[in-house]
Image (spheres, rainbow, N blue to C red):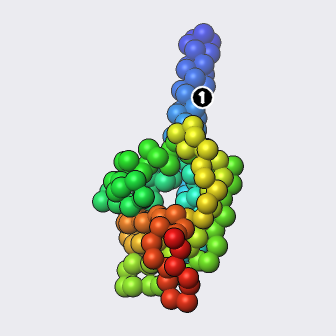
Amino acid sequence: MAEFARMRRMISRRTLSFGAAVLAMLVAPACIHFSRANAFQKATSPGEYEKQMWQDVQAGHALDLRAHMAETFHCTLPGGAMNREEMLDLLGSMKLTGFEIENLKSAPNGADMVVTYDLVLHGTAKGQPISAEKLHVLTVWQAVKRGWIEVAQAIAPEGQWPSGPGQAARP
């Protein structure tokens, strides 16, 4: 009888330990993802959304980048247009040591937000150094149930298009 009670306590302890381990494995990943998602959710302006995206590129947070790009995302670059997967591959290949965002402007348009800014990247892409030249960026963000996502982007090096009002044309 005493042996039976002892075995029953051992089985209860094992079941309790196993249950606690399973619960910890289920909850831990959710907490980790939630804390990273919070950084983006705390953003209160389009400039902060852009900064968070480039911080995610710098930190190698591929899942966070994917979560904030629309399935139909497209980007135009000097080398041509890229869809979401191609852009995620390019961003994933980047090893940024830093970046600078300047001259940020934004304009709401219904459920969308249009953001323009100048960007300088420091680091490598696909193992090659990134030119430290200034890039002009235009991003369209769209409000969805889970927050904001990028739907379109255009990135052009400075001097690649005729200049704007009040600026001298570049050769």
Locate residue 82 relative to residue 157 in the image: left or right. left
**Can you identify the residue that label 1 sits on?**
17
| Quarter of the image where the N terminus is located | top right
Q: Is mark 1 on a helix, strand or loop?
A: helix
Q: Nearer the viewer, residue 98 or 68?
A: 98
Q: Is residue 149 visible?
A: no
Residue 166 against residue 86 in the figure, above or below: below
- Extreme residue toward the front, this view: 171
Q: Position of residue 11 (x, y in %)?
A: 55, 20
Q: Can residue 97 be seen in this view?
A: yes
Residue at the spot 52% in from the left edge and 79% down from the top edge: 169
Number of numbered discs: 1
- Quadrant in the picture for residue 95: top right
Near mark 1 (Cα within 10 A), the count class, few <14, some 14-19 or many ≥20, is few
Q: Nearer the viewer, residue 23 or 162?
A: 162
Q: Where is residue 108 in the image (x, y as percent from the top left)?
A: 44, 85
**Residue type beneath disc 1:** Ser
Residue 5 against residue 18 in the figure, above or below: above
Q: Where is residue 166 in the image (x, y as percent from the top left)?
A: 55, 89
Residue at the spot 42% in from the left edge and 66% down from the top edge: 154
- Quadrant in the picture for residue 24: top right
Residue at the spot 56% in from the left edge and 84% down from the top edge: 167
Q: Nearer the viewer, residue 165 or 146?
A: 165
Residue 163 against residue 17 in the figure, above or below: below
- Extreme residue toward the right, this view: 97
- Quadrant in the picture for residue 135: bottom right
